Amino acid sequence: MKLFKLNRLWALSALLLLLSVPLFSSAGASSGSAKISIGTDQPLGEVGPYIYSSVVRWDLGRGLALPENATPEDFYRLAVWVKSLNLSMLRYPGGTVADAFYWKESIGPPEKRPRGTITGFDRDRHNRITVGLDEFLHFCELAEVEPLIVVNFGNGSPKEAAELVEYLNAPDDGSNPGGGTDWAKQRAGNGHPQPYGVKYFEIGNEIYLIKGRKQSFEPFGHTDIKDYATRLVQFARRMRQIDASIKIGCPVNSPGVVGSCDRAARTRRPWNKTLFEIAGKEIDFVCPHIYGPGERGKEYQPTVEVFVKKSFAYLEARRGELKEIRKEMRQISGKEFEILITEYNMTPSSQDLLSGLYVAQFLSTCIQSGVQGAMFHTLFGFGNRFPALKFVKTHDLRVPRPTYFALQLLSKHLRGMRLATEVNCPTFTSEYYPDLEVPYLTAVAVKRGKSVVLEVINKDIHRDYRTEIEIPGRRFPSEIKVFELNARELKTNNERDLNPQRTTVKLTEKSVSGGGETLTYTFPAHSVTILEF
């Protein structure tokens, strides 16, 4: 009970910090100038419904950050963290490990589940699945999020996938749409008489890869595109025989790229083009995975400024790729699919302020590109380099990292109808992307009711920007609310902050005066700022 109180103290303290801590100043920073104009007469469409989402890996893949001998109740207590982020969707049972997940071994009483083994990213584990399908879906109910299920393509079959849909979505009325075992009756016997109504199913994970930096993907059933697309059609049709309302998604690659499985097989077929030609009629959404550049290896040790410019130029290049994926969809399949980016992060993440700025810029790029969903990989973990919440095993404590606060800031404020913005500010280029002119300021505006919300990311690590903001035909209110993510230095992190009162990278709040036809505000170096007016 004492440890649980520590977690509740974290959540309460984070709220108090938001209300009480003054904004950081960029001591010693020089100043630049910029101008932002917001247009309210031609809205650009709603912010994607699943932009603020994340990934939960099944516990046999060491993805949940639970104490030893944890129970499902220990997992359920983490729902408060998801609710504090105001997330829309959670992906389960994870990425590569999903193609080693046998869902029938994850249902029923935990103590009666068979012991399983997983190889690949994780050491072999001989353990029972504590958080299976029912536990995960109950967690989604507690956290008020929609689930996305990754179907075991690599080691599964269309029949097993159809049975999964029946277990999740069929009514317990004896109809037994798949014949054989009455899976809806089994679900009811496991404590959930009503169908879960899961809509989104992703068929396999990154099937185009054959080998990573440290492991082979062959145990996970990765294959060439012709085999994948042909079998995808079989999976989709069997699953829709059970529930025609479900949505089927699949992994896509960068436009024109040949997957490593195809290169190894010497087929040289472009992944996306072949996929859309063979299976386009069965696809409802596509699932790019986007991992930014990381600081890894002794051979790659750039200066901070070089690495920052490379990271943000990389995201600018991805904006162009998303446009090309949409173009491929329309030209080859004759229709346009939803885009759900089911994994993104830095590679590996440094978990400092830069990682928070990167997440904010990534989400802003998705919003500007009309993406429907983006899932941060991952939410929980054993203190490794990816999760937004660091787990301190010795204290049963979860420490919010800068990526967590970036998600929280945008998910709370940046929703609604997107508005056009015009930014006039200095730009930079990266030696890795010399042809891309990247603005130092990113601006995204949305209309929420009668209010306008403006997000500005200052990617310049040296200069503040004194910025004139205008909304033609509209005056600013007398008081402007300001929310900011920042720290004194770009490399500041929260890794040693076990006391929530001493969190180093955090969200802060203040108010400034408005009242005129224009507003002048100085955006600090290396910051994410939200203005509400």
Image (cartoon, rainbow, N blue to C red):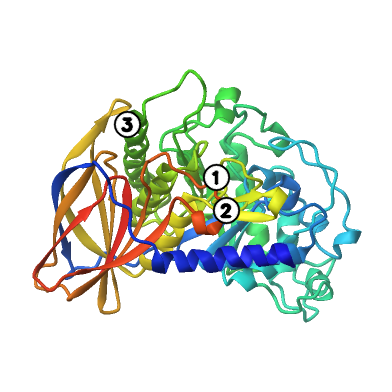
Closer to the chain start, of discs 3 and 1, is: 3
The three-letter code of the residue at mark 2 reads Val
Closer to the chain start, of discs 2 and 1, is: 2
Give above or below for 257 relative to 354.
Answer: above
Q: Position of residue 247 (x, y in %)?
A: 55, 62
Residue at point 33%, 29% (across, down): 306
Give above or below for 243 relative to 94.
Answer: below
Element carrying mark 1 = loop
Viewer can see residue 134? no
From the image, which quarter does the N terminus lie in? Answer: bottom right
- Left/right of residue 347 with respect to residue 37 in the rendered view: right
The three-letter code of the residue at mark 1 reads Glu
The three-letter code of the residue at mark 3 reads Glu
Q: Are marks 2 and 1 in contact (CB under 8 Å)?
A: yes
Q: Are marks 2 and 3 in contact (CB under 8 Å)?
A: no
For mark 1, what is the residue? 495
Closer to the chain start, of discs 2 and 3, is: 3
Q: Nearer the viewer, residue 101 or 20?
A: 20
For mark 2, what is the residue? 399
Element carrying mark 3 = helix
